[in-house]
Structures are given as C-alpha cells and as structure tokens.
Image (cartoon, rainbow, N blue to C red):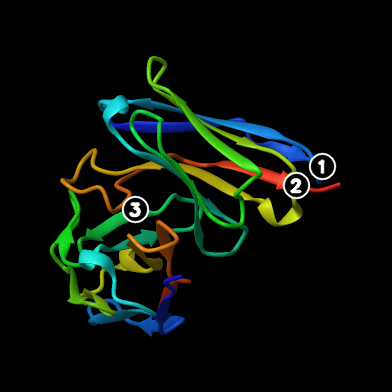
Amino acid sequence: EVKLEESGGGLVQPGGSLRLSCDASGFAFNTHEMNWVRQAPGKGLEWVSYISGSGNAVDYAESVKGRFTSSRDNAKKSLYLQMNNLRAEDTAIYYCVTSGATIPAFDAFDIWGQGTMVTVSS
Amino acid sequence: EIVLTQSPGTLSLSPGERATLSCRASQSVTNNYLAWYQQKPGQAPRLLIYGASSRATGIPDRFSGSGSGTDFTLTISRLEPEDFAVYFCQQYGRSPRYSFGQGTKLEIK
C-alpha cells in the first residue's frame, strides 16, 4: 500500500520553530518529487514547498521563502519541513504529498498523507 | 503569477443531476497541467483528474474533465450522494510551481 504519514505538528508561539516529518512507504521514495501543501482552518489549499527526488532542487511559495526549509533522507524514506519564525498565518493542516505513485504524471498529487495540524498562537 | 478562479462558489443540486464546475486561469496553463481534487470534511483531498482530462486510478467514469488554455471544466454526469463535497482545481508549471483555485462547494439541494 502506498502511504504517507506526517508527524510533528503542535502548538507553537509566534516566532518559534517546528519540524514536520513525513514517512513514506509502498513506493520508490528516492525517485519521487515531494511537496508540502497546507490548508488553514476552513480555507482552501496552498502549495508550500517542493523537493526533487535527489534533494538537490527545492522551491518554495513566496509566503514561506526564507523561513521554511524542505529536506529529505532517502535512506529513511522520510521528508522534512523545518519551519522557523512562525506566524499566526502559518496555522494550518500540513499535508505531505507526492505525484506519480499511481498515475503516469508528475503534475498532480495522487498521494496525500492524513495531515498534521500546526497552530501558531501565544 | 498564475491565479485560478473557480465558479460558482457554491452549487446546489440534487442526486441524479449533472454538475458542471468551472476553473479559469489568469494565464494559459502550461501543457494543460490542470488537476481536480475532491475533499470531504475531515479528510485529505483526493485526486480525480490530471492533465485536464485523465481520470486518476479508481475514479468512477461519471467524473470527466475538459478544457485547455485558460478554461477548464469538471463534469459529474449523474450526482451520487457521496459526490457532495468541495472541489479544487490546481495547476502546475508557472510561478508559483503549483497553485490551487479557491474551491467550489457542491451541496445537496
């Protein structure tokens, strides 16, 4: 079974840091690009970050650039999101997603984790 | 920056009816890399359509996608009770790398 499982969410004060993790199983993790997508309570979806299969290429939404860092450990089949200088507007469910696990395409997200909630509040 | 605008915001229909959801892009979508997702309360989104018109694995054939360039449509031919949910479109390619529409809520009339 193809699966993604996030962890690491929680309550953090403004200006604080948090590290999210995503464990993958059921597919060749090291060949797949990975992304983080978030959803604020009652709102729509927002793409956050991208990382290539090798980890050599990354890309970020303007809203998180300079504050968030995506990385991966292919030996552990794990994806990470280091979030620094957190703001109230970063409060959201964070989903780990990938493409191409069940479809012959890289441009859409066919596998989603269950999400992990991050709350930024004092 | 490419912006996706979905319409209508809310669509009220009855089971058995046909649903037509629209997604319009502010610029042409690269290679028609346009996807549609369904999200039910408390669940992660589920991929329905990719490449504007290809159904994802396990998606019933009552779901179909069409369009090109800047105008795309998701059609549900005959609504089943489980189809009432929120639907998002998403593009790949232009800055930002990925972006989503704001969503259309499909509710029971």
Closest to the camera, between mark 2 and mark 3, is: 2
Q: Which residue was labeled with disc 3? A: B46
Q: Is residue B108 visible?
A: no
Q: Is residue B46 above or below residue A31?
A: below
Give the chain of mark 1: A
Give the chain of mark 2: A
Crowd rating for badge 2 (residues with CA inside 10 Å; few <14, some 14–19, many 20+): many
Label 2, label 3: how many angstroms apart (C-alpha)? 27 Å
Under circle 1, the secondary element is loop
Q: Is residue A107 visible?
A: yes
Closest to the camera, between mark 1 and mark 3, is: 1
Q: Are marks 1 and 3 in contact (CB under 8 Å)?
A: no
Under circle 3, the secondary element is strand
User: What is the quadrant of the N terminus of chain A in the image?
Assistant: top left
Q: Quadrant of residue A28?
A: top left
The residue drawn where x is 31% and y is 79% is B21
Viewer-proximal residue among B23 and A71:
A71
Label 1, label 2: how many angstroms apart (C-alpha)? 5 Å
Q: Which residue was labeled with disc 1? A: A13
Q: x, y (%) of residue B81?
A: 31, 67
Q: Point out which mark residue A120 bears.
A: 2
Give the chain of mark 3: B
Q: x, y (%) of residue A54?
A: 35, 28
The residue drawn where x is 18% and y is 50% is B58
Residue type at mark 2 is: Val
Q: Is residue B78 above or below residue A105?
A: below
Residue type at mark 1 is: Gln
